[in-house]
Amino acid sequence: MAKHRQDAILHCIYQQYVGLAYYIAFDILQNKEDAEDAVQETFVRIIKNISKISDPFCTKIKNFVIIICRNVSLDMMKKRELAKMEKLSDCISNKHYEADPYDVVSENESLQIIVDAVHELPYRYKDCIYMKLVLELDYQEIADILKQKAETVRKRLQRGKKILSKKLEGIGISFEG
């Protein structure tokens, strides 16, 4: 009977959030097939944790789906970028690349450092920064998703950007979010 209940919970979560998960994944990956793969992986991870979910209509479930999907998509994007870097490295070593390789590699390394620094932020800041800068949601939309006041979201963004800016300045990268 417990298995049937878990299946029902998963079905409810899937029906309610598959569209949102696809939107998030596509926004990050900008590719239909990759977004579909990310959504599939998101729900595989939810299945692995389904025993921890007792109410599919709980307000925390939406945030859970958003965060898992975002992390899956960002991981996929990182892997894709690493593959591009390897191809670039091959091109440079084979001398088929005409742009200044130092500039290209330096730019990609800086971007990776920024992404890593965002990942290191506490969740309350990381999620707000991600939704604002990547998903381009406004304060009220973020507040609705996180079930917070818009003013709380604004403060978290302000504090998160300040922490991120200090981290990056400490390693010589200028950031103005």
Image (tube, helix red, strand yellow):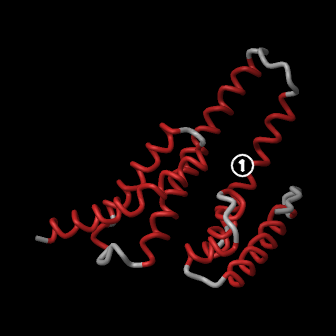
Q: Tell me the kind of residue under disc 1.
A: Gln
- Say which of 93 and 35 sits in front: 35
Residue 70 percent across, percent down from the top left: 54, 57
Determine which residue is flagged by label 1.
112
Examine the image and state in which quarter residue 51 appears.
Answer: bottom left
Secondary structure beneath label 1: helix
Q: Viewer-proximal residue, 34 or 78?
A: 34
Pinpoint residue 103: horizontal percent, then vertical percent.
86, 35
Residue at x 83%, y 66% (from the top left corner): 165
Pick the residue in front: 175 or 58.
58
Residue 84: percent from the left, percent from the top? 65, 32
In this rendering, the answer to whether 152 lies above or below 115 is: below
Position of residue 106 in the picture relative to residue 5 (left or right): right
Q: Residue at x 45, y 76 (%)?
A: 60
Question: Which part of the image, by quadrant, shows the N terminus?
Answer: bottom left
Q: Is residue 62 left or right of residue 8?
A: right
Residue at image coords 69%, 84%: 152
Residue 48 in which image quadrant: bottom left
Q: Residue 143 appears at what percent x and percent y?
A: 62, 77
Who is closer to the viewer here, 150 or 44?
Answer: 150
Counting other residues with Cα less than 10 Å from the Cα at mark 1, is it few (<14), some (14-19), or many (20 or more)?
some
Which quadrant of the structure image shows residue 52? bottom left
